[in-house]
Amino acid sequence: MNLEQFSLNNRIALVTGASSGIGNCVAKGLATAGAKVVVAARRQDKLQSLVGEIESAGGEALAVSMDVTDNSSISAAYEQAENHFGVIDVIVNNAGVADAKNFLKIDEDSLDFVMDTNFGGVWHVAQEGAKRLVAAGKPGSIINIASVLGLTAKVGQTAYCASKGAVIQLSRSMALDLMKHNIRVNAIAPGWFKTEINTEYFDSPAGQEYINRMPARRLGNLQELVGPIVLLASEAGSFINGTVLPVDGAIHGAGI
């Protein structure tokens, strides 16, 4: 086996939601694998700090402001990235939000907040990127960050589960439509990793009890997401298309 297949040298990667958590870690991992990385989010101060980390480690990175619910913001970010690095050929759709509520208590604003970011954001960022790849005649890889809750369900997470389930089906359908353009589309379904969104819960007695019921008896380490994403982004994953890869310590099969 040739390990050079995993190299991302000469690739240009976009990571949305890169200001913290999964996106921050994945951006650094892609840079380590050789990609020039475009980090996108609304919090520019945190993005600039991330760019500094990547550059200090010998990588190349660019911070762009992007609101994934605003098409003009998405287009402007792509334009800035292309002017700096060239056409983006690896897209990691990571930006996401949660609003934990029982189904009966979810109003239109709450539903729109979750769906517009988690599903609409993935749709529009991927579509803009795919159009640019097709226009340039360039192959690419789109990796949509779904969730184990797109494969299973959890009390009080109706909108989130629905949004991530939609991302999974979107990824499968996109793969079929974009295959003829040599653009692969896959989804990652992370289990539970400690991030800004859930730290308070997992530090609580209830969160600790839930961790103890997990098959792995622990949360994932963010670094454990980097390898699967590099696989899907690189030539090592050249025949992986339209798949959903759980990275969850077997939670999706445990029904908890």
Image: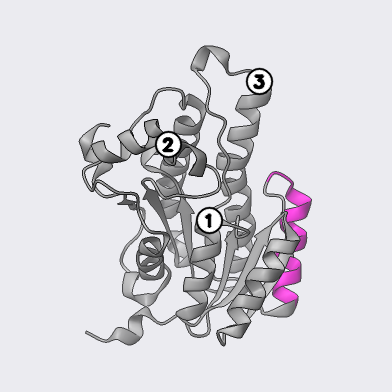
Left or right, 116 with respect to 205, comes to right
- The verdict on residue 123 being magenta is no
User: What residue sits right under mark 1 in the picture?
Assistant: 21
Observer-side mark, 1 or 3, equals: 1
Secondary structure beneath dot 1 equals helix
User: What residue sits right under mark 2 in the picture?
Assistant: 165
Amino acid type at circle 1 is Gly
- Nearer to the camera, 174 or 96: 96
Q: Is residue 93 visible?
A: no
On screen, 98 above or below 184?
Answer: above
Quick one: label 1 or label 3, which is nearer the N terminus? 1
Quick one: label 1 or label 2, which is nearer the N terminus? 1
User: What residue sits right under mark 3 in the picture?
Assistant: 108
Which region shows up in magenta?
Answer: 69-83
On screen, 208 above or below 175?
Answer: above
Left or right, 209 with respect to 84, comes to left
Amino acid type at circle 3 is Glu
Does the magenta stretch mainly form a helix, a strand or a loop?
Answer: helix
Secondary structure beneath dot 2 equals helix
Instruction: Give coordinates of residue 172: x percent, y percent.
Output: 39, 47
Quadrant, the N terminus: bottom left
Instruction: Using a 10 Å C-alpha cutoff, classify the residue at mark 3 as few (fewer than 14 neighbours), some (14 to 19) or many (20 or more).
Output: few
